[in-house]
Image: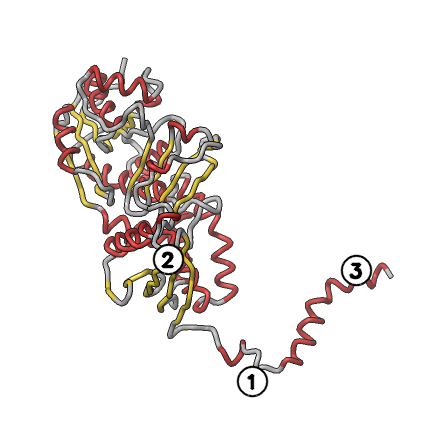
Amino acid sequence: MAEKVNKVVLAYSGGLDTSVILKWIIEKYDCEVITFSANLGQDEDIEQIRTNAQNTGASQIYIDDLRETFVKDFVFPAFRANVIYEGQYLLGTSLARPLIAQRQMEIAKLEGADAVSHGATGKGNDQVRFELAYLSIDPAIKIIAPWRQWGLTSRSALMQFAKSHNISVPATHEKPYSTDWNLLHISYEGGVLEDPWIPAPEDIYTLTVSPQQAPDQPEIIEIEFEQGDPIAINGKPLSPAEFLTELNRLGGIHGVGRVDIVENRYVGMKSRGIYETPGGTILRTAHMAMESITLDREVMQLRDSLIPKYAALIYNGFWFSPERHVMQTMIDETQQNVSGVVKIELYKGTCRVLGRKSENSLYRIDFATFEDDDVYTQKDADGFIRLNALRLRIPKMRRE
């Protein structure tokens, strides 16, 4: 017998999984289901999502525009750390889940719901990300995770369920990809992509043109930073969401930001995914260039040593953990002088730093020059080298 549930708030995308879940929860628990859809920048028909939710039986429908919040409070803090998971993944899905879960829990409290639900499978990372966030906000909340409960064991079975219940969904047998789309990225998993030897079909890409088909002439842009966050492109001030939207457009034109990854999921298996992250790829490159002239060496190395741990916390669903908050405080402190302008060239799938300048620059031509200077005594290096070599010399001297 199913646990007694009075009212559920479902994280609803309008796709195959959550459309089936909406109907399944209504039938299984005989309860009211409220849907919540977050606009994080995905190019989807919001009104169609509303119509689908109404037709499938939702008692209430929340659709919130969270684009500015997503970029300002989740993407930018992570990119102040130059965050990257396993050297390749810029965490587009991982950064979106805690925001969706946070707003979902706000709606649950507002509507007096005693349960929340999501469409994540029992094999993936998202189930962990959603549920760790839920429980950090309300330890007593009931969680319905249909993929861990029902007998629908494949997306083919879900499509059959949808057909038998007259549910309109976008997935087809020809293109059964699982996708996640927001202002930071779009991802593709499943279908033919499950064989890591087979190249991704060109027709799956949405945000970027093929680098081979990109313009033959490079485009040069300037990105301005203030305390670690980007604030303008080519001198034009932009809000966080506007900035990433424009950077996605520019990167997409030039085929920047495509990656084909086999990553290690938190639950223990390896997974192959295709990601398009044009704006994020450019932003990370530019931010690192800005830091190269404004961050102290030891501060940079200390912060960089934390990137794998910080990225893993986000990837594994610990955005609301105390250790992530502590690390964020330290990371943000490192960004106080990271202000200035970076010049980037976009060309056929690449983004290349052409220049950087800052009023806070620690780079001094008079120290670094190979020409004559009056500020650096080269002979001082004698003692510096001998002192650093001391611990290397002593073992050899002892043996002799």
Amino acid type shown at disc 2: Leu
Please tell me which residue lies in front, 280 or 149. Answer: 280
Task: Decide: is 14 above or below 331.
Answer: above
In screen coordinates, is 155 left or right of 309? left
Amino acid type shown at disc 1: Asp
| Residue 117, image quadrant | top left
| Residue 373 disc label | 1
Extreme residue in the bottom direction: 374
Q: How far, Cα to Cα, is label 1 from label 2?
A: 36 Å
Task: Decide: is 395 above or below 182.
Answer: below
| Residue where numbered disc 3 is placed | 395
| Residue where numbered disc 2 is placed | 346
| Residue 170, image quadrant | top left
In screen coordinates, is 294 left or right of 239? right
Q: Which of marks 3 and 1 is nearer the N terminus?
A: 1
Dot 3: within a 10 Å radius of its alpha carbon, few (fewer than 14), some, or many (20 or more) residues? Answer: few
Q: Where is residue 18 in the image (x, y as percent from the top left)?
A: 25, 28
Q: Position of residue 272 (x, y in %)?
A: 44, 34
Q: Residue at x 19, y 24 (%)?
A: 168
Q: What SS does tag 3 mark?
A: helix
Mark nearest the camera among 1 and 2 is 2
Mark nearest the camera among 3 and 2 is 2
In screen coordinates, is 357 left or right of 157? right
3 and 1 marks in contact (CB < 8 Å): no
